Amino acid sequence: MDELDTREWLLTNGLGSFASGTVCDARTRTYHGWLVAALEPPAQRMLLFSHLEASLEVGGLIFALGTNFWLANQVEKVEPLGYRLLREFSVDPVPTWVWSLGDQWQLHRQIMMPYGMVTEERSPEAMPPFVNRVLVQYRYMGSQQALLRLRPIIGDRDFHQHQQEIPALSFSQLISANQVFLQALQAGKTGTPWSLSWSQGQYHPEETWYWSYYYPVEARRGLDYLEDLFSPGYLTVWLQPGETVTLEARVGLPSTTLPDQLPAIVDWTMQAEQQRLEQAFLPFHSVSSVSTAPETMVLWERLLQASDRFFAWQPVQQTPTIVAGYHWFGDRSRDTLLSIPGLTLTTGRFSLARKMLDRLGRLCCQGLIPNLLPVYGGDVSYRNIDCALWWIETLGLYLEATQDWEFLLEQYEVVKQIYKAFTTGTLYNIRIDASDGLITWDDTSVPLTWMDTIVGGEAVTLRNGKPVEINALWYSALCWATQWATLLADRPDVENVDRLLNLARRYAQQADQVKASMQKFWNAQQRYFYDRLEPNDRLDATIRPNAVLALSLHHCAFSTEQSRQVLYTARDRLLTPYGLRTLDPADPAYHGMCNGTPDQRDRAYHQGTVWSWLLGPFSRAWSRFCTAEGEPLPLDLQLLLTHFQHEGCFDAIAEIFDGDAPHQPRGAIASASAIAELLRQWEELV
């Protein structure tokens, strides 16, 4: 490699834990490390094992294989330059590096993160065991014996924070044959216990600190960018040509795995993961209606595997969830609901969808569902207006896909609770305006839609009043409720049939009122929808993608002609190869780039920044209103697929992109909803 290749790779284990780094093997982010363990899955993620500093001695010459960024006298430098010996990198089936010096020697390294759960299907009374671990294997090829030196670089810190050498922080190590047990000690408190094991070699305890690791991505993001990491010692391994050494880092008490078992565990892990994925997608191995061209099917399989990264099991609560995005996002209900159709319904993983919908339904309080989900007794925040409405929409899509009417019977009380809360009023003065049947709220202190960024205590994108997509969701919810009440009234095992039929009539009447009132959003001059009706009856003519969201729902309140005009405007002003802009570039408030300090990024987050998941709603709406008239989808998917396969993070789609060309990826490197929408709309997009 003549230049540093800082494209990223990502491994997850079904618990919210991850391993991540770059092609050149340098850490460029706070979040890079080989074992970032979710101690309370999928939360409380801690960086424990950063990496191994490696060197190879062959024929009396020592070759440093590592690559690191440092900051010395405010000058960025790279040392050592191991990337110059790097000849190959691939991510299939696991991240694999090959260093070599001509035909003199070659060193392969593979990193894998075994799936953390024994199984997803166990009896409710038996808490599934889970383990956070990572495996690393080196294989040497050459004409003579070589000495491999491996120095573990470790930490014990929250994955958002940095570690610094301070007198109060130390690391204890308990050394045994082929294993060292490690634990941080700070201010009388013990850290996370974990162990590092190896199949062969001699361990030498030699404690040292490495100061001022520099993370250039964090520096560009206006965040802290320096960190000190600790090394407890180093391992030396004599390798004959063809030999391997395998290491395992594992959270918890010392492992009882025998050294000679470790190489076999690597092979078993890869086979087990392949079998698990095959079993997970057994109901949906192929897309029969899509071209069966080999390259198309390979890409489809890669998308399926990418989708699996975002599922995380909660062992205590015995429920699955979706991690909204890596590296830093967690368990968020809006993202879960947006992702369920693509990640579970399209792929045939219906049991996961059912469990997640059930969990969210149980959290409903005063008609609202929290966006930030509680973890082990943590605080619950109901600061949103749309999650309950997205829950009804997603429940409807699940029922349409599965015909699971028993589940509807279980969840119908939640549907009625949401309806009652919105009609009588709930938190933040969310209520129905009796004059037109539309949902409104007038609290200016809290942003309640998905455009929810706050800077300096104020909402950046204020959308109080009557937002268009919220009322489109309300209309769709009323249509679903009408359909379900009618369906349940026909069941022989349901009581109070007359009451259900009365409810169905009431829902239908309100849906008709809302449909008529939705015409207030039509802006005939711009041939677009007003983004919201403000509390003072002013009309917000800002051109945003929320109009497209309103057209993408299962039940739509607008005419075909209005919808086509809206989509033409969105195509001309918002559409990019990577998603929809959140604001028209002609708007004075438009930000073409989402970079700079945290405040600068937050102010640009919904003011022009492209959101990748919005390609799905646009595609859905276009297929409904324009494709039927013979107009092909105005999108070349190749740039997005190139990004997925070869740019940013391999086999991932970034959360956001700059509004201005060349639309640099920003935000989280791997977005669940972006992958979900690509899967959901695959037939329309390919």
Image (cartoon, grey):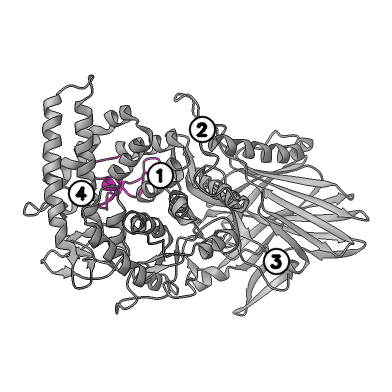
- Structural distance between the alpha carbons of marks 4 and 3: 56 Å
Residue marked by disc 3? 67
Q: Amino acid at mark 1?
A: Ile
Quickly name the residue at label 4: 475
Most foreground residue, 172 or 288 = 288
Q: Secondary structure at mark 2?
A: loop
Could you classify mark 3 by the number of other residues whose Cα lies within 10 Å: few (under 14), some (14-19), or many (20 or more)?
many
Q: Which residue is mark 1?
A: 340
Q: Position of residue 455 (x, y in %)?
A: 32, 68
Q: Can you say whether 118 is above or below 135 in the image? A: above
Find the magenta span and give its range: 363-390
Mark 2 or 4: the one toward you: 4
Which badge, 4 or 1, comes first in the chain's sequence? 1
- Please indicate, yes or no, whether residue 529 appears anywhere in the rendered image: yes
What is the number of the mark on residue 221? none
- Which secondary structure dominates the residues rendered in magenta? loop
Q: Nearer the viewer, residue 86 or 159?
A: 86
Where residue 183 sits in the image (x, y, percent)?
Answer: 61, 46
Q: Amino acid at mark 2?
A: Glu
The residue beneath circle 2 is: 120
Q: CA distance from mark 2 to mark 1?
A: 17 Å
Q: Earlier in the sequence, mark 2 or mark 1?
A: 2
**What distance separates the C-alpha of mark 2 from that of mark 4?**
36 Å
Does label 3 or label 2 sit earlier along the sequence? Answer: 3
**Residue ranking furthest to the front:** 630
Question: Is residue 385 one of those drawn in magenta?
Answer: yes
Q: Earlier in the sequence, mark 2 or mark 4?
A: 2
Residue for point 13% across, 48% down: 512
Camera-side residue of 265 and 259: 265
